[in-house]
Amino acid sequence: MTAGSGSSPPQLEVRNVTLRFGGVTALDDVSFAVESGSIHAIIGPNGAGKTSMLNAVSGVYRPRQGRILLAGEDITRRSPHARTRLGLARTFQNIALFKGMTVLDNLLIGRHTHQRCGIWRGGIYYGPGRREEVAHRLVVEEIIDFLEIQHIRKQTVGTLAYGLQKRVELARALALEPKILLLDEPMAGMNAEEKEDMARFVIDANEDRGTTVVMIEHDMGVVMDVSRRVVVLNFGRKIGDGTPDEIKRDPRVQHAYLGQEDAAADRRKAAAGGA
Amino acid sequence: MAAGSGDRSLLPPFGRGVVNESAADSHASPKRRQEGPDPRPTAANDPSTAPLAPAPDLDTFPKLLVAAAARLGARTALREKDLGIWQETSWRQYHDHVRDFSLGLAALGLRRGDKVAIIGDNRPEWVYAELAAQGAGATSVGIYQDSNLVEVAYVIDHSDAVFVVAEDQEQVDKILDMIEKLPKVKNVIYSDPRGMRHYRHPALISFAAVEERGRALGQSQPRLWAESVAAGRADDVAIICYTSGTTGFPKGAMLTFRNLLTMAASLNQVDAKLPGDEFVSFLPLAWIGEQMMSLASSLALGFTVNFPEEPATVMEDIREIGPHIMFAPPRIWENVNSMVQVKIMDTTRAKRLLYELCMPVGYRVADLRFARRPVPLAWRAAWLLAHGLLFRALKDRLGLSHIRSCSTGGAPLGPDVFRFFHAIGVPLKQIYGQTEISGISCIHADDDIQFHTVGRPIPGTELTISEQGEILSRSPSVFAGYYKNEAASRETLAGGWLHSGDAGYLTEDGHLVVIDRMKDVMQLAGGASYSPQYVENRLKFSPYVKEAVVIGKDRPYLTAMLCIDMAIVGKWAETHRLGYTTYTDLSAKGEVYDLLHREVEKVNETLPAAARIQRFVLLYKELDADDEELTRTRKVRRAFVEERYQEVIAALYAAAPAPVPIDAVIRFQDGKTARIQTTLEVREVLPAAR
């Protein structure tokens, strides 16, 4: 999978990554590359290793073997916050926001890694500290405008509806102004309308802000509509990698992923027939 | 949620305690109420604050704008909240935008007498576009921003618009979807480029690019703008307002500058607005009420118009601005009132006690004032105390601290809501009028408010009641006719009077009382006459009822179809530990039926026996303009609704109340549809005395 412009290295490259927990192999020699400006989906049945893959990329887990490269730079041994500084941001499957703080404060925290003033200059709030804070507020306000969350700017995150919290989490990730954005099931638990909004925001983030997106998602409709490339994992192995159309036609993928549904449907039919 | 999602709630829940202003927040709002006294200059001899003398030569909007730019220059004309900050536009900048855009349109081929359609939320670009069109001798046609594809296309096509100014991707999509059917449209101009990076349609051009062209033209022909403005005449058609009639296709009412400016001047005589006043523009600019205030009155009197950040932030933005002038239809005031009641139910016992102590004082004083009786000193003192303890804080929370001129119009407002606002010291007035008379013919005077009336005619307006009981009016503000609809114009203006279609009568002291639409005053099969709207308004005063349709014409008794208020009933369900998923689910709950049953019983007590509701259903969806059940100004289209829900109505009049199976399709703004399947319970309120 070395397609693309050739001259510049891919935005994210995963090379032969293997991740083990005791005797369990969560990821087994997985490799793929994400071109700059792409929307890349990772799909697979439950327990396939999708979130493990994202955790390995964001630095929560350290792979046993293999390397992870961000724009050609090896980050395998870097800490999560160092990766953040290099332009990596993520959201979580279970929302990880500060529930007692306002939306605005949560987003400003997202700007923390870009803050140059320390506790003293920031605390005095005059001169550089003030200028910096105003600049960060501007970035945050642009994201608030971008994600259409003006009306909840000053509300406490914990009081918001689930769909809005998901949107705030995306906003916080965008507040980092990342080069690459990792989304772990951004549409899980949403209704059709919220999903459509979220899909539009992901596309806008990709097109208008030029953010490369890597996303785990279960909703096949969204995956096929939104993503440019799809990586399929099954039992920790990569079994497919291609455009959505290629993936749909790939017999291995059909067998491992979609085939399961057929089997499940068959079982249901059998059960219904038996009853 | 289903169809409810199409409704842009203008009033989000408000009052989340004292807003915590973090350090970074201090640049967010330039106009903090903590700044102390009202910053407006008060010197009466300051020429720029003196009310504009009615200058006979300033007889069009663009002429007024040019004069205001010269006179008020750097003062704030418009304010828009963007990125959390109130961004100001001076009268000079306002004028320059209009000039550039106007010349830009001329460069693109706009000629005098052409039409320019405008669609979008309330933003400065909306008013720039309108004034620019008028400055070039063209007519502005506003389109309700939540209109669906078919409605948008109808108005654009029927008005012969050659340019469409659309706010953003959402609106541009509607127009581009129908562009093949709109051959008269030369260009679609958008002001917000967000999400349109890959749009390549040849007719598309950005607002900024049009202004750029205008600047270029202005440089090569420096006198063009002044000449173009000077060529405008008072009797030119300024705007065409498409009235979303409750029946049939909308009709385009043509209003001239003379119509609109005499209206503004006459209204100002009885309800004064001052230069430097603040006004928040949050209702559709396509609506005559918003044209009255944000355009005609603002240009004539020089007050500041503020545009909220988003429809969802309106309440908060009103609070930040603290407007002096407010004009809103009843549903806004009703929402504010019911929100207050809900918050009071939710609050601590001490605060509730305070509320229950203070409100009776407010009501007592308000009632004395309504009766035009002197208020005894003791009651005045008590009111002042209650004001200090409660009303002042409440008004601040609602953004009504500075309010001086506030009115409601478009539909009748329940007396209880009226009393509520007067009790806390908000001098709410009723306005009555039609689009065809530039929005207003009657208003309450400051010291003469009777909540069952709509006040007296404004200066220059003659009013009479026809033999059939129809309200007729005549004034210089009566419109020039419907665009391309001679027959309807003749009918509406028969005999030189504007036929309102409303039934009403005049009281002995000259106040007008509006009963209902002529065609809506109905008779029961038994012969008793009743006004469904009256009953509906009583029902809608319940905070739990969002919309009510009362049926009874030629039937033995009255029944009602109610739509619950999702926000408030949802809250009620939460506090009563009642789980629910969607609007449909919530409205079908037995407990919710019981709740509404009690509300209907309460209303029944206030009604004469013949006009009591005997059965009701809770509809499975909110009535929605996208489903053509409401007009864009949210009036019920009765005939359509009765047609659409005929099975439900049949069940309401069945011998024994039985559940109705429902299988319906609802439509969203973008033309998509969804299907609802459910069963509807029919609830009997009064025992069958039939």
Image: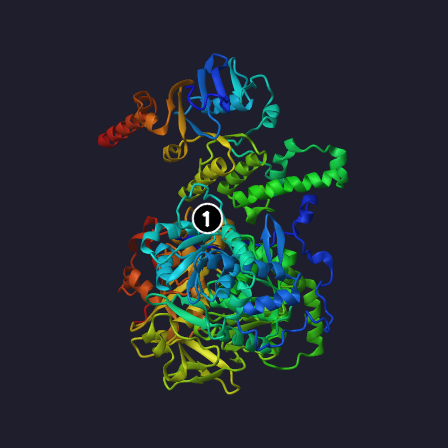
- Amino acid marked by disc 1: Leu
Q: In this view, does B53 lie above or below B96?
A: below
Judge left or right: residue B35 versus residue B419: right
What element does badge 1 sit on?
loop
Across and down, in percent, residue A145 comes to 55, 45
Question: Does residue B629 appear in this view?
Answer: no
> Where on the picture, by quarter, is residue B75?
bottom right
Residue at image location 42% in from the left, 63% down from the top:
B115
- The vertical placement of B596 against A275, above or below, is below
Residue where numbered disc 1 is placed: B578
Q: Quadrant of residue B63?
A: bottom right
Residue B12, above or below B537: above
User: Looking at the image, which is closer to me, A92 or A229?
Assistant: A229
- Residue A244 vs residue B214: left or right? left
Q: Image point 42% across, 57% down: which residue?
A: B163
* Image location (x, y in percent) of residue B590: 39, 54
Quadrant position of residue B155? bottom left
